[in-house]
Image: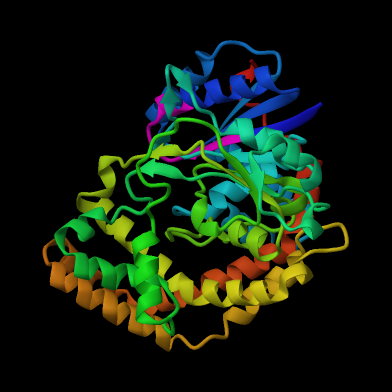
Amino acid sequence: MRSICLTLPTNRHCPDTVAALGEEAAYAADHFDIDVHLLILDSCPPADRAAHAAALRSLPAHPRITAHHLDEAAQRDFLTRVTARSGSTKPELLLDLMLPDGLSYGACTNRAFLIAAALGCASVHRRDSDSRYQSVDGRTVFPVHHEVLSLGERAADALAGVTGSTLPEHLLERRVAMVGSSFVGELSVDIARIRDADPAVYHDVVSLWAPEGWSAGRKRALVEESFTGAGTEPFTADHSLLAVVDPMRVDMCNIAFHGATVSERVPLPPARDTIGSDYFLIHLVHDARLPGVLHNRNIVNYYTGERRTGPGFLAYQTRFAKFLLSMLYFHHVYDRMAEAGDALLDERGRARPAAVAALARESTGLDTAENARRLDALDAAYRRLGGPYAEFADLLTGRRARLLDEARGDMADFALLTEAWESMVAAARTTPVAPAEGGPR
């Protein structure tokens, strides 16, 4: 029987989300012939972890659901054994990239990929702690429905389970590598207050994630589309499309990857404190022309208060600034991947890690002058806003050289991790996950 990993990485108090994830796991097990590993990767303080453990214990028992609740100590124990078995000459560095001292959107999902491999799961299905499911007429709309229907199937076989298809016929023999949707509600990046305060500044700031050479019109179109997800329209009826999925149409709070094709082949960039670093595989799937399914079971996005005041505000704006700087490198890699197309895949239609690692390493040789200009433009925009944004501009000034170096170093780390990834996945498959709270449910 096929096993899937439904995972929630979290560093905030979210017992209600844990309970809702348990309901999604039960839906999947009840409606499909699968086993579900429900994986909570918990980086919270002890009191919050206890609340999450209580939420897991409260879930109804199910013979085909196994709950795993791993704090960072348990994750570190597992990763230490994996990196030691991987044969790498730098196991300590790999461990640091997998479980860094600081927030990393890519690293937390990479840990889920390795644990899923250890558990024998065919796919990884990720959700976020600051989101919730839509409901229609008292029925919760779970994205896992479309994910389990299609993921890993030959695209030709997946046709029967979707509403429509735009996939070219010559791609129908490839396997569905990704199934995803987006979100409704608040912007995916917490900058709506900039838009409300000064639309012109908002345009200047958001356009900084475009390549510098784009035309004004193209940048304007990007700004209008950015971070809006599926807008605000609520779910009414299912629609799913087999396609080469546009990366702008899906979000990492509502995504699933087929392990053998994608997530066991190439990791996510492990950049610290960088929004958007976990979106790389969405672009890889698109540029390699791997089949995907885009559905409309959008998740509801919302924000918690810690991002908007005091240290939380400064930390979040730093992550956004580092996102803007990362795009110098990512745009280079995305452009080269689009040119490579089928060359990103091996003879079995799987992502080629060596091809991706080479492009990431190539990007580290780029001139950083464009990023220096990005910081200049961001500084000017935030000083026009004044108040806490001007205070953040002062912080940026003091960290300028360090931020430029970190953006380049993050891509070098990604190249290194990608080169080691196949060996780490192979090691994970033979490494037991530490005993987890909950056991069979």
Residue 168 percent location from the top left of the image: 74, 58
Q: Is residue 89 visible?
A: no
State the extent of the magenta-drawn residues as a range. 6-18
Residue at 66% over, 53% down: 166
Residue 16, magenta (yes or no): yes
Q: Nearer the viewer, residue 22 or 299?
A: 299
Indicate left or right for 391 with 103 as reference: left
Indicate left or right for 197 with 249 as reference: left
Q: How many marks?
A: 0
Residue 296, magenta (yes or no): no
Indicate left or right for 145 with 217 as reference: right
Report the coloring of the rendering.
Answer: rainbow
Q: Is residue 336 visible?
A: yes
In the depicted structure, whether residue 236 falls above or below residue 185: above
Residue 86 percent location from the top left of the image: 78, 54
Residue 20 percent location from the top left of the image: 48, 24
